Amino acid sequence: MKEAIVSRGPKVHIIESEIPKPGPGQVVVKIEYAGSNPKDWKRPEYWGSKASINQGDDHAGVVHEVGEGVSDFKIGDRVAAMHEGKQPGGSYAEYGVSWAYTTIHLPEHTSFQEGAAIPFAAFTAACALYAKLNLPHPTHPISDLQKLPLMIWGASSAVGSYAVQLAKKSNIHPLICVAGRAQEHVERMIDRSKGDTVIDYRKGRATVAQEIKASLRGEKLEYAFDAVSEMGSYQTICDVLDHQTGKITLIIPAQSYFDIPKTIEKSVTTVASVHEDLK
C-alpha cells in the first residue's frame, strides 16, 4: 500500500508499505478519507527527524480486518476511527490501524469525508469536559432548573464545536462561547433561550471580560475550556473565572501557563489520554 511520511518543512514523501495487521483489540480500516490536524505538521517541525513518520490519526472507511477479541465490528462495516499517535499504521495511508475503543460506526447518512473529521476533535472535547473538568456526562444530564455556566474559548474550532455540542447533550447552560469570524457557526449550535451567548474575542481583553461578566448575570464562572490556549485567551478567561473554585483546561502541552493564578485548578487536555490514563 501507499503511505505518506510527513517531515519538517512540512514535506510529504510517499512510500510503499505492507498492509498492517491488527493486534488484539485492534481494527484495520481500508481508508476512504483521512483527516488532518495541526499536530501533524507541528510534531516534525519541532522534533525533527525523529518525528518523520505517518502523522495521520483520523480516518474513515470500511473495516478490512479485526483483531482478536473485537466483537463490535466486522469486515465491511462503515467506520470512523482515531489511530494511536506515534504508532505504526497511521491514517495517511491506504489502510490504517485503530483500537476498537476509538472506532465508531458511521450511519449511512454520514459520509466518509464527514466521518474523518470526527474522532480526534470529538474525543479531545470529551476528554476536556468529562475527564479534566469532571462535568456531568450526557448519560446523566443536569436538571433544567440548574444553571452551570461553562466558557468555551475557540467555540468555532473543530474541538470547540464538539465541546459545545457535548455540553448541550449534558444540558449544561449557559454556554459562554468565544469566537471570531465564525460566530454564525456557533450561533447555530447554541440555545439563546437558556442563556447561551457568543462573544467576539477581537473586541479586546477588557471588553470581552466585561461582556462575559454581563452574560453571567451574577452567576459564578467555575468551568472553562480553552480550545485555543494562546494569544491572550487564558489570561482573559482568568479575569472572570472564579479564583477560589475555578477550573480551566487547556490544549497546548508545551506551555507552562505560569501566569494562571495558583488558586485556579488548571489542567492540560490531550487526546492521547484515551490511550493512557483514561484507557
Image (cartoon, grey):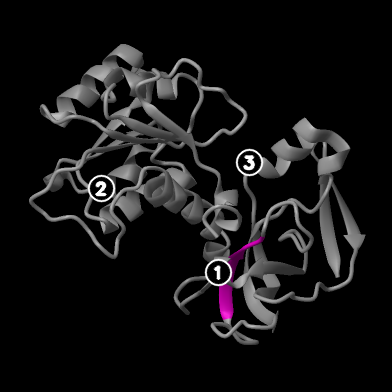
Direction top: furthest residue: 206
Among numbered discs 1 and 3, the one appearing first in the sequence: 3
> Where in the figure is residue 249, as x and y percent of width and height?
43, 36
Which residue type carries mark 1? Tyr
10 Å neighbourhood of mark 2: few (<14), some, or many (≥20)?
A: many
Magenta part of the chain: 78-83
> Where in the figure is residue 26, as x and y percent of width and height?
67, 73
Q: Is residue 211 magenta?
A: no
Q: Residue at x 39, y 17 (%)?
A: 261
Disc 1 to disc 2, how far (Cα)? Answer: 29 Å
Quarter of the figure with the C terminus:
bottom right
Residue located beneath label 1 in the image: 101
Which residue type carries mark 2? Ile
Q: Give the main secondary structure, helix, strand or loop, of the magenta stretch.
A: strand
> Where in the figure is residue 105, as x and y percent of width and height?
51, 76
Residue located beneath label 2 in the image: 190
Q: Residue at x 51, y 22 (%)?
A: 257
**As rendered, which of 163 and 69 lies closer to the eye?**
69
Q: Residue at x 28, y 53 (%)?
A: 136
Q: Are marks 2 and 3 in contact (CB under 8 Å)?
A: no
Residue located beneath label 3 in the image: 38
* Foreground disc of the pair 1, 2: 1
Q: Is residue 112 visible?
A: no
